[in-house]
Amino acid sequence: MKKVLFATTALVASAGIASAQGVALSGSAEMGVVGGGAYGDNFQFWTDVDVTFTFSGETDNGLTFGGSIDLDESDGSGTFAAGTTVGASPAFAGTSQGGETVFLSGAFGTLTMGDTDGALDWALTEVAIGGSIDDAHTAHGGYSGGNEADGMLDGQIARYDYSFGDFSFGASVEVDDTGVADPTFGVGAKYSTSFSGVDLGFGLGYQSYVNAGGATQDAFGVSVDVMFAGGFQAILNYKELGDTDAGGVSETHWGVGVGYTFDAITVGANYGMYEEGANQQDGFGVAIDYDLGGGAEVQFGYGDTSTCGVYAGCATVDQFSLGVAMSF
């Protein structure tokens, strides 16, 4: 009994120290069922747990600093934080970024380093609305998570951003640790405004990146998102990408998302398409969420992918999920 009381006292004391130092612990958990062609047409159970530590502090002259680490992303499992594909280019595969970010912020702006977005991804709004436990609504082949130009080297990105009024500006760089490839550079800008009950946002960005063959290419993108007072939302996203796979042909992507929130229910749908010469890949996704309150939400997701090639014809694959997502 004394040992239990001592352990409890130590835990409470350490929690107080962590709080005083600006350390926060958050997490999420998911449970449910998944299925569809993406799972071999097998019906499966789904569970996932994620824990994130976030720390922050302030200097004597008012600078804020901090960092975060996602334990799910740093466990050596080969998975990484959303928006980052590590060592995606075969020429630079095998590097790793463990899901951590560190920042320093002040009147000069904010400098972030680690597993963070490049300027292009930072500036653009993705078309997904709603959520699903296995991301079925965004796992289809027509969806762009904005990471085509990120993580192709070592996955460690440095980004500076600065906001003034309704405008924000960002610049980023990612370097090849081996010194073989040129660094990738990005710039982006965002503007947001409101009028007559409508929130309107624009994003514009450019970024260089290293393709699958190790050559430096260009990427350009633009997005528009609109939120109406009645709960309706619409998002448009367009990108032009250089030769992504060293096949000699540039690639374009466009996507659209619409959603509606009423009471505790959110319904979202998105569609997107990649086109590269005579090849194309498109897909759509649907998410239906019901907020139970207290951080718990029932989520249904569905995604469908269609791929068409010059010689292979067309193929389709789908996936679905139903479960409960919890945040703590």
Image (tube, rainbow, N blue to C red):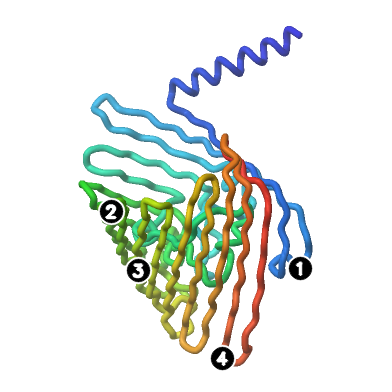
Mark 1 or mark 4, earlier in chain: 1
Amino acid on which the number 1 mark rests in the picture = Asp
Residue at the farthest bottom position: 311
The Cα–Cα distance between marks 4 and 2, rounded to whole angstroms, is: 42 Å
Residue drawn at point x = 47 percent, y = 59 percent: 259
* Viewer-side label of 1, 2: 2
Q: Which element carries disc 3, helix, strand or loop?
A: strand
Amino acid on which the number 4 mark rests in the picture = Val
Residue drawn at point x = 22 percent, y = 42 percent: 108
The Cα–Cα distance between marks 1 and 4, rounded to whole angstroms, is: 27 Å
Residue at the farthest top position: 2
Q: Which element carries disc 4, helix, strand or loop?
A: loop
Percent coordinates x, y for residue 269 in the rendering? 52, 63
Q: Which residue is mark 1?
A: 41
* Viewer-side label of 3, 1: 1
Mark 1 or mark 2, earlier in chain: 1
Q: Which residue is mark 4?
A: 310
Q: Which residue is mark 3?
A: 221
Amino acid on which the number 3 mark rests in the picture = Gly
Q: In which quadrant will I find the C terminus?
A: top right
Position of 317 compared to 114: left or right?
right
* Viewer-side label of 4, 2: 2
Q: Which element carries disc 1, helix, strand or loop?
A: loop
The Cα–Cα distance between marks 3 and 1, rounded to whole angstroms, is: 36 Å
Q: Which residue is mark 2?
A: 192
Mark 4 or mark 2, earlier in chain: 2
Position of 109 compared to 89: left or right?
left
> How many C-alpha atoms fall within 10 Å of the one at disc 4: few (<14), some, or many (≥20)?
few
Percent coordinates x, y for residue 9 in the rendering? 62, 12
Mark 3 or mark 2, earlier in chain: 2
Residue drawn at point x = 43 percent, y = 79 percent: 251
